[in-house]
Amino acid sequence: MSLTLAERAEAVLRTADGRAKAALSREHAAAWLAARDGSGPAMEIGRANPPDRPARPDRPELLAPRDVPRRRPGTPAGRIALLHAVAHIELNAIDLHWDIIARFAHVPMPMGFYDDWVRAADDESRHFVMVSECLEAMGSSYGALTAHAGMWRAAEDTKIDLLGRLAVVPMVLEARGLDVTPGMVAVFRKAAETKAVESLETIYAEEVSHVAYGSKWFHFLCGREDRDPKDVFHELVRHYFHGALKPPFNEEKRAEAGLPPDFYWPLAEAH
Ligand SMILES: [Fe+2]
Ligand SMILES: [Fe+2]
């Protein structure tokens, strides 16, 4: 009996090692996509029992945000620290995308919902491996430095609220990635770190679709419940997200991802 999609999602969440998590994620993504295009055995959505927190490697040591050392991107050590933080975000993102599948498997959704999050999880798995390889080429590795402990908080806060999860994870946190990635690309370009530039450009191009998946399914669910998406978004972000959104916003990429200015500007901090 072949595993269901939800069981496969749970298996990724329960895999601790980063490279092993990414590899299993890619394998399950390929099996799902093969089931969908008819080239592989059919797969049910099924049900799962995802852990409250995903399994993670012993290293990096996770610290409260205020204890994570500040980075100085003008130095090689600072650039390694920046990439290490990106690798940590990508590993977390693999878990976030599988968690939305495992955690909300009981909510009836069109098949395209699963296609989108499986594809996003597959992208994040490639991103994690790419950035880990950059770190290794620079003489470091994922786990060599400390990392941010608070990354799973948004998932825990929204574990019973699919609309809240979509609002906070893809439409706030991943959208923030669109705002800050061009600045990171500039840092590595200035330092002539070609491999890092190429990796960050790939990530930047692919993350637009993850924000777009969030916006698409958020609008779908609001429409199904006959609720106004903008009002619901403001209400849920104020409820689940701790703090104001930080301009400057990448309005062009946000627009490409289906996030109009009247969604995020009213949630920006006073400036
Ligand atoms: Fe990513
Ligand atoms: Fe993403």
Image (spheres, rainbow, N blue to C red):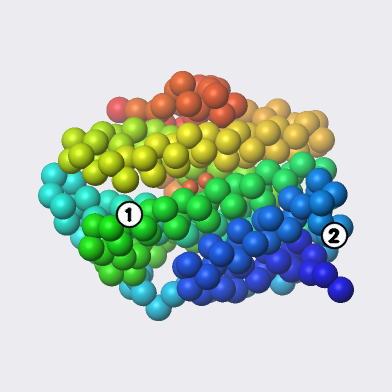
Q: Is residue 61 above or below residue 221?
A: below
Task: Identify which residue, 187 or 33, lies in the foreground.
Answer: 33
Circle 1 residues within 10 Å: few <14, some 14–19, many ≥20: many
| Horizontal and vertical percent position of residue 219 | 70, 32
In front of the other: 267 or 123:
123
- Residue drawn at x 74%, y 63% is 6
Residue tagged by mark 2? 41
Looking at the image, which residue is at 52% across and 38% down? 206
Is 166 in front, or is 120? 120
Q: Relative to 25, is 63 on the left or the right?
A: left
The outermost residue toward the bottom is: 58
Q: In the image, what residue occupies the spot 50% across and 27% down?
A: 254
Q: Secondary structure at mark 2?
A: loop
Q: Residue furthest front?
A: 39
**Residue 187 shows up from this direction:** no
Residue that badge 1 annotates: 134
Q: Amino acid at mark 2?
A: Pro
Q: Which kind of residue does numbered mark 1 sit on?
A: Cys
